[in-house]
Amino acid sequence: MSNEKGLQDAHVRIGTKQTVKTVEMGQAAEVFVAKDCERRLISKIAALCASHDVKITYVDTMNDLGKACGIEVGAAMAVIVK
């Protein structure tokens, strides 16, 4: 992932519930989704982002996304807050 440093420096919320809530509130700048998280979660966030005109960037694995966010565990998704 090319902007790993940026994710650690930006205001990021990690996790599915936090990401969904941030998008619904209109505060999301960009969403990152791990390709290996549950399909239903990918479908839900993709539809939500489309309806709120939020860019989605897909990351290969939950472990990669967790590392990019500066945490020791995997993350299904994360959001950069406007």
Image (spheres, helix red, strand yellow):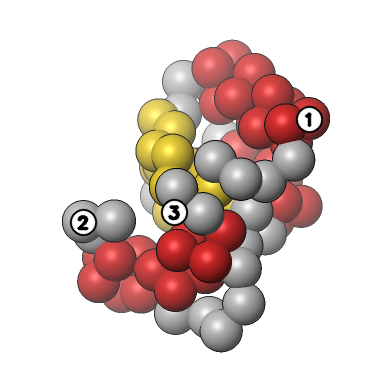
In the rendered view, would you say 34 is above or below 74?
A: above
Q: In the rendered image, which quarter contains the N terminus?
A: bottom left
Q: Residues within 10 Å of mark 3 (few under 14, many from 20)?
A: many
Q: Position of residue 50 (x, y in %)?
A: 54, 17
Q: Is residue 68 left or right of residue 75?
A: left
Q: Is residue 70 left or right of residue 7?
A: right
Amino acid beneath label 1: Arg
In the rendered view, would you say 61 is above or below 36?
A: below
Q: Position of residue 20 (x, y in %)?
A: 70, 42
Please give the residue where the numbered disc 3 appears in the rendered image: 80
Foreground pick, 1 / 24: 1
Q: What residue is drawn where x is 48% and y is 61%?
A: 65
Q: Earlier in the sequence, mark 1 or mark 3?
A: 1
Q: Which mark is residue 50?
A: none
Cα distance between the residues tagged 2 and 3: 15 Å
Please give the residue where the numbered disc 2 appears in the rendered image: 2
**Snapshot quadrant of residue 48:** top right
In the rendered view, would you say 57 is above or below 53?
A: below
Q: What residue is drawn where x is 61% and y is 62%?
A: 75
**SS assignment at label 2:** loop
